[in-house]
Amino acid sequence: KAGVTQTPRYLIKTRGQQVTLSCSPISGHRSVSWYQQTPGQGLQFLFEYFSETQRNKGNFPGRFSGRQFSNSRSEMNVSTLELGDSALYLCASSPRQGAARGGELFFGEGSRLTVL
Amino acid sequence: DAKTTQPPSMDCAEGRAANLPCNHSTISGNEYVYWYRQIHSQGPQYIIHGLKNNETNEMASLIITEDRKSSTLILPHATLRDTAVYYCIVRPVTQGGSEKLVFGKGTKLTVNP
C-alpha cells in the first residue's frame, strides 16, 4: 500500500504570497490531519477533516485553511505568508475517525516551506 | 489532554535495550498512552499504544505502571536506525470524533555504535 503522499516536498515563497500544499492519504483512509512543525514550537495541530468536513481546528489564525475532497485528498492553504510560517507541514491519515482504538496516525514526509 | 514529561535526551549503545521513560501523573482512566517517533527529516511514526496492560509488538514493548502515572517504552535491541525523537502522548479513548494528537518535546534518543 502506498503511504501518505505530500506535494511539494520543498518550496520557497516570499512574504505576502500564498501557498497550497497537497496531501493524498493512504487508500481507504478517510480522516486527514495537518500539523505544523517548527524548531521553536514543535509539532502543532492545525486541523483535521473527515468526509469532507472539518472536524477539529487548532489555534492558528484564519490565514491557515484547508479542505478535503470526496476522494479524501486534502489541501491546506496559507495566505499572506509571514516569515514565521516557515516550517515543515505534515499530513497524517487514519482509517477511522475518533474510534476507541483511534490515534494511530500515518504521517507523510512533509512539505518544507521556507518564507523569505 | 493530560501532560507528559520526558527526559530531553538519552543515549544507548547499539544492541542494548533502550528504556525511554514517560511521566503522565494526571492521566485519566479513559486515556491511552501512545508512543510515536520521528527520525530526522521524516514524519512521525506510530510505535505502540496501551491503556492498562503491558503491550508488545514487533517494534517495541510498552510497560505501564499499575497506577498508570508513568510508562516505559522499551526497544529491546537498539540499532543505529532507532536514533530519533520519541514522543509519549496521552489521548482520550474517545474525543468527540477527533484523531488529534498533542505532541510534547519528546526524548531525543541517540544510539551509539
Image: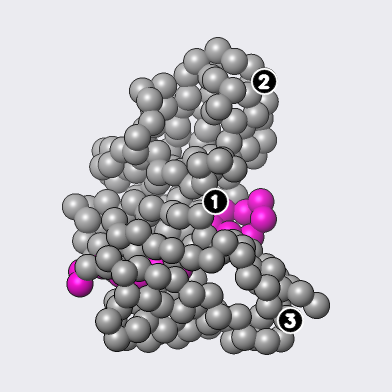
B5 left or right, relative to B91: right
Q: In which quadrant is the C terminus of chain A drawn?
A: top right
Write down the residue under mark 1: A108
Write down the residue under mark 3: B14
Write down the residue under mark 2: A116
The residue range painted magenta reads B29-46
In the current view of this chain or complex, which residue is farthest to the right? B113
Above or below, A66 against A48 in this view is above
A12 left or right, relative to A72: right
Quarter of the view holding residue A53: top left
Residue type indicated by callout 2:
Leu
- Identify the residue shown where x is 34% and y is 38%: A58
Q: CA distance from mark 2 to mark 3?
A: 41 Å
Residue A44: where, in percent of width, then height?
A: 44, 44
Q: Is residue B90 visible?
A: yes
Are labels 2 and 1 on one chain? Answer: yes
Local packing at callout 2 (Cα closer than 10 Å; few below 14, some 14-19, many 20+) is some
Q: Are marks 2 and 1 in contact (CB under 8 Å)?
A: no
Q: Secondary structure at mark 3?
A: loop
Q: Is residue B37 visible?
A: no
Output the chain of dot 3: B
Residue type indicated by callout 1:
Gly
Above or below, B11 against B55 in this view is above
